[in-house]
Image: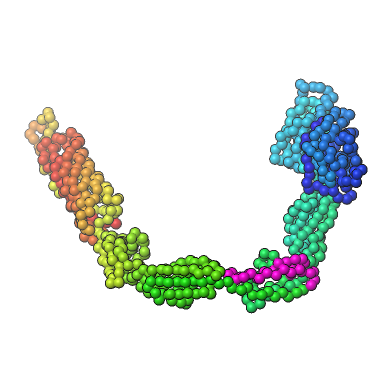
Amino acid sequence: MAIASFRIDEADQTANVSPTIRFDINGEKCALIKISTTQKNFSFDVGSLGITHTEWQNSEHPGEIWLYVPNGVMKISIQHPQFGSIKDYDLGGRLKKGRTYVMDLTSDQVNTLVVDYDNSQVLDVEVTPHDAELYINGLKQNMDFNGRTSITLPFGIHNYRVIANNYHPEESQVIINDKENKQTLSVRLKQAFGYLNVNATSESKGGELYIDDVRVGTLPVSQFPLKSGMHHLSVYQKLYLPYTEKVTMTDSATVTLTPLLKPNYAEYEIVVDGDKEAQIYNNGELIGTGHWKGKLEAGEHIIEAKKISHTTITQKINVVKDTPRKLSLSQPLPIYGTLEVKTQPSNAEVFIDGGAKAAGFTDFINSHLLIGSHHIKIVLPGHKTEEFDVDIKEGQTERINQVLTDFCDATIYSTPSAYISIDGKDEGKTPLHINRIAGNYRVTLSAHGYSTVSKNMRLDGNTMDMTIPLHRNYILSNEFYMQVGCNMGGMMSLNFGLGGFIHNVNIEGNYLLGLTNSELIYWRDKSGESTPFTATYKPFGGNIKFGYGIRLHSRIRLTPQIGCRIISLKETIVEYTKTEGYPEPANRYESAANGANAMSLSGGLRFKVALAPWLGLSVSPEYLVGISKSNGFKALSDVSSKIKGYADGFNCNVSLNIFF
C-alpha cells in the first residue's frame, strides 16, 4: 500500500456547498480528503483533532472514500488488515477549511496460486480511455497511443489497476495459466463526469460562463465535460444582473440549462451641446461622437466629452435601473497657444496643417492656435520651401526664424530620351524638370546603345533649359557575332565563324575551307619499282581564338588574340604515268600523305569597324607557328612551300560580321 499523490483541487467545491458540506465540533467547515481506491476495510487516524465523518464508497462516488477532517490537520495514518499501514504521512501543511483535497491510494499485490516461473504467457491489454494508466503488480506499464500493450507474465494470479483523470479507477485480478494461447484483458473505465449544455437566449448570448469561479467560455456552451458532483455556475453579461445556479453532475449524464437573465440598465441619451465632433466616453470607453443613445448599466458612471486640444468635460452620474434620462454635456473649450514665424526675405506664405489657403504672410503671428502638434510650411516663389513640426503649448509662444534659400528651375532634354541621375541619384527619364537650390550639380545621362554622358551643370537664376545629345555606341562590352569571310596569305580559304564578347573578353571559333589546291606532287615508292603518280592537296580545318577587346572609337575595336589552328589535307590523285617496264596497277594509288595534318599556334590582332549597330567589317592579321605535324605533312612541306604555308607564316582574314 502506498500514497501515489496528494494535492488540493481548487475547482472542487464539494466541501464548501450544500448538501456535501460538513462542520466540525466548533461549527467550522471541515476539509474534505477524497481518497481514490476501490478497496475497503481501511482505518484512518489524523491525530488529536479526530475525524469528523467518513463516507465510504457508494453509488455517488464508487471509487472514492470521503474523509471529513477539522481545519488544521497536518498528518494522516492509514491501516489495512491485508495491505499493511502508512504511518504519519505528511500532508504538506495545515489543511484549510472548506477545501477539497485528492489522495491517490495504491494497493497493488500479486498472489500466486501455483508458483511456476518456468511457464509464462503474453497478456494483451486494451484500456479505454486510451490515455489511462495501467499498473500490474504495482508497476506502471508502457501503453501505445491506442491504449494497448502486450506483457509477458508468469503463471499465477496478478493484480491490475487502471486509472485516468475524470474516470473511476478499476482494480481486479487476472489469472495467467494457458501456455498455448495468448490471454487478453480489456478494461473500460466508467466516466466520473457528465456533460453540461448551457443554452443562450438573445439576452445571454455572448455572456461569460464561470463554473466554480473558473471562466470556461461564453454562451452558448455545448457538451462541456464536468466532473461528477455539485458545482456552482455563474453567468455574467453586461446590462444584466449576474445569474447563479447550483448544478449536480452524475456519471455520463447530460445536464442542460437555459439561464434567464434579468435586465439591470436604463435607457440614456447623451448630447454634447453645440459640438458634433466631441467624443463621448463612458468609464473611459468611447461610445459615440457628439450624440449617443443607448443602454447604461445600473450604478455609477463617469461620462466625459473630449476633443483634441480642448478641455475635457466630466460628469459623474448614478444610473437607476428602468429610469431613462437625457444628459447634456457642455461643449469642450479650446486651449490656445501662440505661433510666430519670421523669414528672410519676408512676405512668404505660411500654411498650417496642410491647409489649401495660406494662414498669412511673414512676419506672421497667430495667438489663437490650438495646443498640440502642427505642421508648418513656408512658401516663397523662387526659394526652397521649408517645413517644420511644432508643438504649441498653452499660454506659450513657439517661434520660427528662417532664412530662405534661393531656388531655380530648369528642364533637361536629351536626344534620344535617356535615364538621368543628378549627383548619383536616379531622377527618371528626360525630359526632366528640376527645381533645386542654386549650385553646381553633376548630371549623368545613359541610354541603351549610346555612350553615357556626364557633365557639370551650374543652376542659378540665369540657367536656361538645355538639350544634351547622346552619341550612338556601336561597340558594346557584351555582344555576340556571326562572321563569314576569306582567309588570305599562306592559305586561301573561306572562313565561317561564331564569337562573342563578355565584359570585353573575347572567344571566337572558325571553320576553314580551302579554296585552292596545292601544286602537283609526284610520288613513287622508295624501291623505285612502283608506277609514279601525281596528286594535289586541299586544306580544311578550324581554329579557336581568345582575346580582350579594346575600344578605340565608338565604331572601332582592337582585339589582341592568341589561338590554335588545326589543318588536315585532302588528297586528290591526278594521274599516274605509264612507264615502260612497269606494270599498270589494278587500283589507284594512295600516298602516305592522305589525311596529313598539322597544329599551329597563332598570334594576331582583330580590327573591327562597325558599319551599323548590327553590321561590321573585321580584319584579322595573324602569324602561325607549327607545333605539331604528321609525317605526311612534313614530307609535303619539304617539297612544297605552299603546303608549308598552311601551318607556318603570315595569314590575314577579312570577314563580314553580324552582331546581336
Q: Residue at x 68, y 74 (%)?
A: 329
Q: From where the camera sits, is residue 575 visible?
A: no
Q: Magenta segment, which residues?
A: 295-323
Nearest the eye: 340 or 459: 340
What residue is at 27 percent from the left and 62 percent from the top?
455
- Decide: is 484 above or below 526: below
- Magenta segment's dominant SS is strand
The question of residue 317 being in magenta is answered with yes
Q: Which residue reaches farthest right?
A: 25
Q: Which quadrant of the figure has residue 50? A: top right
Residue at the (17%, 39%) spot, across then down: 625
Q: Picture coordinates of residue 5 (x, y %)?
A: 77, 37
Give the color scheme: rainbow, by chain, secondary structure or one colour. rainbow
Up the image or down, 611 lies above or below 166; here it is below
Residue 598 rendering spot, x and y as whole percentages: 20, 38
Residues 545 and 393: in front is 393
Residue sitting nearer the eye, 388 or 523: 388
Q: How many marks?
A: 0
Q: Nearer the viewer, residue 480 or 473?
A: 473
Which quadrant of the figure contains the N terminus? Answer: top right
Find residue 560 and report its horizontal and vertical position in percent: 21, 47
Decide if residue 45 is in sight here: yes
Q: In screen coordinates, is 450 left or right of 392?
A: left
Task: Tell me the quadrant of the picture where the C terminus can be found.
Answer: bottom left
Q: Is residue 8 magenta?
A: no
Q: Position of residue 248 (x, y in %)?
A: 85, 51
Residue extending furthest left? 580
In the image, taking residue 154 as reference, residue 469 lies left or right, namely left
Q: As drawn, is 620 to the left or to the right of 272?
A: left
Q: Which residue sits at x=31%, y=65%?
A: 439
